[in-house]
């Protein structure tokens, strides 16, 4: 087990207030104020043909419940997180490059081939991820409000 992969929650720890439908293979937790993150979520939605991903901003109640369940302080969490197989015995929370590559894996098709980058050392992947994460606001902007309104179909994929 690594610092980026956390142990699964036990059945008793599952928060009944969070309703993630069984069709979701994973939930992407993202910085809702980040221009790069917003663009990434739009990119994922367009390529998720089977609609297996759901999305929750780190500033929202769903992400905060999930992070607390895994013993994380939501106020200190940044970057991208991925909750894989929510509610199942295989449930796990990934962070940084593991989360990004896991998301590509869940998209399937040609995109899952990019997840082969996992074979590079995690330290190297996370170093590169860190450069982008530290500079994301300067390079892509920080937005209090994202101007583009989601379509009804996209809204159904967003968790509070």
Image (cartoon, rainbow, N blue to C red):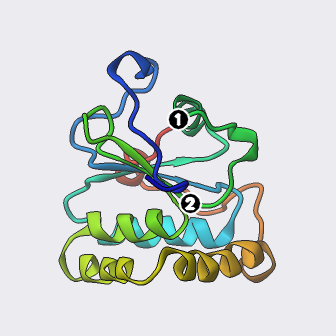
- Other-residue count near label 1 (Cα within 10 Å), few / some / many at <14 / 14–19 / ≥20: some
- Other-residue count near label 2 (Cα within 10 Å), few / some / many at <14 / 14–19 / ≥20: many
Residue 78 horizontal/vertical position (percent) = 68, 55
Q: How many marks?
A: 2
Residue located farthest toward the front when viewing the structure as drawn: 1
**Rendered view: 107 above or below 67:** below
Residue 113 horizontal/vertical position (percent) = 25, 82
Residue drawn at point x = 42 percent, y = 84 percent: 120
- Which is closer to the viewer, label 2 or label 1? 1
Q: Earlier in the sequence, mark 2 or mark 1?
A: 1
**Rendered view: 3 above or below 99:** above
* Side of 3 relative to 92 (left or right): right
Q: Which residue is mark 2?
A: 80
Residue drawn at point x = 36 percent, y = 25 percent: 10
Residue located farthest toward the right when viewing the structure as drawn: 138
Q: Which residue is mark 1?
A: 70
Residue 58 horizontal/vertical position (percent) = 62, 46
* Side of 77 relative to 97 (left or right): right
Q: Which of the 4 image quadrants contains residue 128?
A: bottom right
As rendered, which of 117 and 83 lies closer to the eye?
Answer: 117
Under circle 1, the secondary element is loop
Q: Which of the 4 image quadrants contains residue 45?
A: bottom left
Residue 150 horizontal/vertical position (percent) = 49, 55
- Give me the C-alpha separation between circle 2 and circle 1: 15 Å
**Rendered view: 48 above or below 58:** below
As rendered, which of 80 and 97 lies closer to the eye?
Answer: 97
Q: Are marks 2 and 1 in contact (CB under 8 Å)?
A: no
In the rendering, which numbered label is found on residue 116? none
Under circle 2, the secondary element is loop
* Side of 51 relative to 19 (left or right): left
Residue drawn at point x = 56 percent, y = 39 percent: 63
């Amino acid at each position: 087990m690594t610092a980026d992969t956390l142990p699964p929650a036990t059945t008793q720890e599952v928060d009944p207030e969070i309703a993630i439908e069984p069709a979701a293979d994973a939930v992407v937790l993202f910085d809702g104020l980040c221009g790069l993150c917003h663009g990434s979520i739009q990119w994922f939605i367009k390529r998720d043909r089977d609609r297996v991903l759901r999305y929750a901003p780190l500033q929202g109640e769903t992400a905060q419940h999930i992070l607390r369940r895994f013993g994380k302080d939501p106020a200190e969490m940044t970057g991208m997180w991925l909750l894989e197989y929510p509610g199942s015995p295989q449930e796990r929370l990934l962070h940084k490059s593991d989360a990004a590559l896991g998301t590509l894996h869940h998209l399937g098709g040609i995109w899952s081939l990019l997840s082969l980058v996992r074979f590079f050392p995690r330290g190297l992947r996370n170093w590169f991820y860190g450069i982008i994460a530290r500079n994301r606001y300067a390079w892509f902007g920080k937005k209090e409000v994202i101007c583009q309104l989601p379509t009804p179909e996209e809204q159904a994929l967003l968790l509070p």
